[in-house]
Amino acid sequence: MRNFFILLKHELRMLLISPPTYIAAVLFLGLMGFLYWAILRGMVNTPEESLPIVQFLSIFWIPVFFVVPLLTMRSIAGERSTGTLDTLMTTPTSRVAVILSKFAGAYIFYMLLWLATLSFPLLAAKFFPSAALSGSLLEPAPIIGGFTFLALSGILFISIGIFASSITRSQLVAGMLSFTTLFVVIIGGQQLGNIAEGGADLSFWMSEMVNYLQIFQHLDDFSRGVIDTRPFFYYTSTGVLLLGLSTLVIEAKA
């Protein structure tokens, strides 16, 4: 455990001096700030039934596609290309501790970026006082539910990035693999759901599996306060599986 915290401290320091981290932060906050402003402007012109935070969180997938690859692509691939990973593997440090520290470092930054968006409603209250008076900007239930979803799904998304980085020594390849996998998991799962709803002849277990993978449906449920144990199991178990595979990969390539 002591080695884990030492490695985590090192990983956080490396993320702080890594240009992709700041690129991800600037792109994320700039893009999400603009989109939040656009949502509020749209609601002023055309009132919507759904709350601003619900609409805002529904576009979570846009930043995920570039933030996760930028935060994770150098985690293992970068160290493997410079030879520092080989040096680390010669020490008594547990391979599991290495993977967990890299996951935890990227996950912490990922969640800090999302938590920073909580400042948007506070800033918006100055420019959209009518929305602030209605209480719609800081409705607690969708905020708590939505951020619970972000924390859970982030386990899977960051694990995908760590696994992609573990199977190559090229940061660029790791980033592309991470992006492609995230696209398949998020958008591909949604398209499968659309096909199923379109009347496709699927067996019962296949239909249940498709419903199980509906990430957007999970977000909708959490935002409405519907707590289901299946998403908890899906995100955590799949994340643990990918981190376990990452450990086996670096062990095999050591």
Image (cartoon, rainbow, N blue to C red):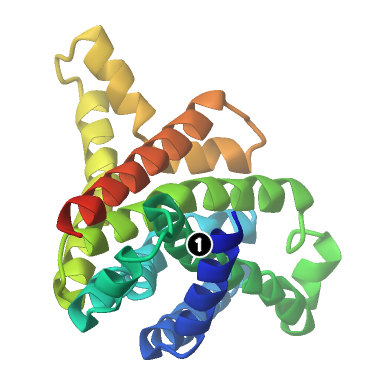
Residue drawn where x is 62% and y is 53% of the image: 147
- Nearest to the observer: residue 242 or residue 196: 242
Residue drawn where x is 29% and y is 68% of the image: 76
Residue drawn where x is 22% and y is 34% of the image: 192
Instruction: Provide residue 55's location: percent of width, then percent of height.
Output: 54, 57
Going by the numbered disc 1, the residue's amino acid type is: Tyr
- Nearest to the observer: residue 98 or residue 239: 98
Residue 144 visible to an observer of this rendering: yes
**Which quarter of the rendering shows the C terminus?**
bottom left
Dot 1 falls on a residue whose secondary structure is helix
Instruction: Provide residue 112's location: percent of width, then percent of height.
Output: 60, 70
Q: Is residue 130 above or below residue 240?
A: below
The residue furthest top is: 204
Residue drawn where x is 53% and y is 45% of the image: 152
Label 1 Cα neighbours within 10 Å, binned few <14 / some 14-19 / many ≥20: many
Residue where numbered disc 1 is placed: 107
Instruction: Provide residue 104's location: percent of width, then percent of height.
Output: 51, 60
Picture quadrant of residue 190: top left
Report the number of numbered marks: 1
